[in-house]
Amino acid sequence: MNPIEVSNAAIGPHPLIGRTLVVTRAVAQADGLVTALEALGATVVHLPAIRVEPAPDQAALRRAVQSASDFHWVIFTSANAVHFFGRAAEDLGVDLNGALESTRLCCVGPATASGLEALGLTVEVVPETHRAEAIVDVLSARTSLRGQRILIPTVAEANPVLSAGLREQGAEVDEVIAYRTVFVEEAGPGVLDQLQEGVDLVTFTSPSAVRSFHRLMGGRIVAAAAVIGPVTADAAVELGYRVVVEADPFTIPGLVAAISSHLNEGGNG
């Protein structure tokens, strides 16, 4: 059984009946979380706080895909990076398995690794702590990074901690923008009215979703937060949210199971 099914077996088939949760994921990515929460009986208010779009200029990403075999490591910091890197390869007719055959792969967390494994690729490194700093620590502990060529397909305006840390270790880092996140400017019709009726938890799966949702709410905290991991938790806390749920593992099933467990152990939003 997957983590959600294990949780159901322990506390009943519909443990979230009477609970209202907000899902802030982008439309294209929200179905799995919305469906899982509704299957457990929750009322879900879907307020997509961000849109995920391909990089406006695809040239650098396409060059990176075509030259992937020239790198010692490729580091993926999100499932979105995997998706858009894979899509660029498909558009170019590049076989990723062949292109990355001699390249070592590192992912920031299990959900990102799963995306690569679904493409038939083998991930060599996933740090136990799913942060950029941990990637630097793990890779530098395995081998000298001096002179190593490292490719990082990333989001526009990515936090520079990872690339800076690798360069400090002597690595040659090539960051290419694979995608961008765009803040949604307004909530859909009737969504704000639903929020006024009361919410148990707001779910966040990225720092950008935290910041955009907070802006949509005019800075008002409507409920405590359930987050997918520590980086998202940091963004929520910084804006004043009380984080009462953090997924373990840092995946959508892990988030759903953690929410279910928290609310059924007497936790509140």
Image (spheres, rainbow, N blue to C red):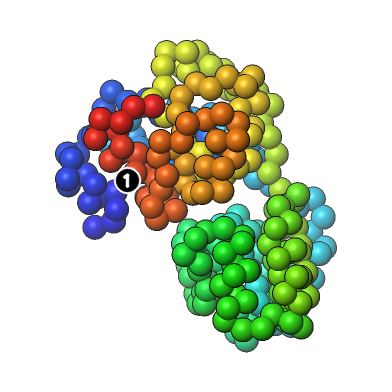
In depth, the one of 68 and 143 nearer the eye is 143
Name the residue type under label 1: Ala
- Asked where in the image residue 79 lies, by quadrant, the reply is bottom right
In depth, the one of 126 and 93 nearer the eye is 126
Specify whether residue 199 is in view: yes
Judge whether 155 appears above or below 224 on screen.
below
Which quadrant would the C terminus be assigned to in this image? top left
Q: Residue at x 38, y 52 (%)?
A: 248
Residue 123's x, y, as percent? 51, 74
Q: Residue at x 49, y 49 (%)?
A: 229
Q: Residue at x 53, y 22 (%)?
A: 221
- Which residue is label 1 attached to? 257
Specify whether residue 28 is in view: no
Residue 227's x, y, as percent? 47, 41
In depth, the one of 153 and 55 nearer the eye is 153
Q: Residue at x 34, y 27 (%)?
A: 268
Q: Secondary structure at mark 1?
A: helix
Residue 178's x, y, as percent? 71, 58
Residue 84's x, y, as percent? 65, 59
Judge whether 91 appears above or below 29 on screen.
below
Q: Badge 1, how many Cα within 10 Å: few under 14, some, many 20+?
A: many
